[in-house]
Image: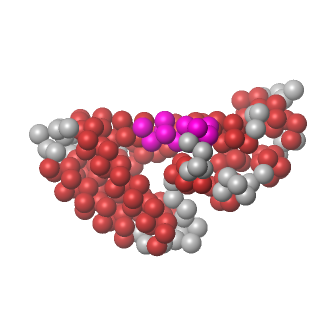
Amino acid sequence: MPRNPAGTRTRIYAAAYALFYRKGFQRTSLDDIAAKAGVTKRTLYYHVRSKDDLAGAMLAHQHGFVLAEMARWMGSATSTAKMVDQLFDSVARWMAAAGKRHWTGSGFTRMAMELADLPGHPARVATRRHKSAVQAELARRLESCGTRNAADAAAQLQMLLEGAMILMLIHGDVRYAKLAAAAARRLVMRHRS
């Protein structure tokens, strides 16, 4: 039995996320994950029942990190325009830091797309929960900036954010973050109190 189960589980999740993000779910084996995490396959199975369950648990684990990163991106903005600018500028910097050829967008979105034909898959369930929490956080932030119909504005903002990331991935062009930010600013201005 492992001496530090929580630490081992965290290493397994980190290895799975890195491999799923780089290679995709289908092309990553449990052997790959065990090797990257530095554990035996027996230890891996001590912590997870299957690759499907691992994908869901790993995304659930990643959820808190991504929400914290998103909060950091938006900072303590008190105006919707500043919040939107900071959010989309951060997405653009994320792509620039990774390099156009190595940036692959949101791991949650990529996983959901790869498993599009399996709506009940644990990774799809974790992604749905995560994206709902992101939208709720956007709504909370928009409301605190005085936005009317913050829930609707947050859904629209999230669509622009997701669309920008997908088009950035497809075209390798950070300009989509800037275009989405301009659309988002117009959108939130229409929802001002």
**What residue lies at 46% left-to-right and 45% top-to-bottom?**
69
By secondary structure, the bulk of the magenta-drawn segment is best described as: helix
Q: Point out residue 37 in the picture as x, y percentages from the top left corner.
A: 78, 46
In the figure, 173 relative to 139: above or below? below
Residue 93 at least partly seen: no
Residue 132 or 137: which is nearer the viewer? 132
- Residue 12: which quarter of the image? top right
Task: Give the residue at the far front of this rendering.
Answer: 117
38 inside magenta stretch = no
Residue 11 or 168: which is nearer the viewer? 168
Q: Point out residue 141 in the picture as x, y percentages from the top left corner.
A: 29, 38
Residue 2 or 50: which is nearer the viewer? 50
Q: Which residues are magenta?
A: 120-132
- Residue 59: which quarter of the image? top right
Residue 138 at least partly seen: yes
Q: Is residue 34 left or right of residue 108?
A: right
Q: Is residue 93 left or right of residue 104?
A: left
Q: Quadrant of the N terminus?
A: top right
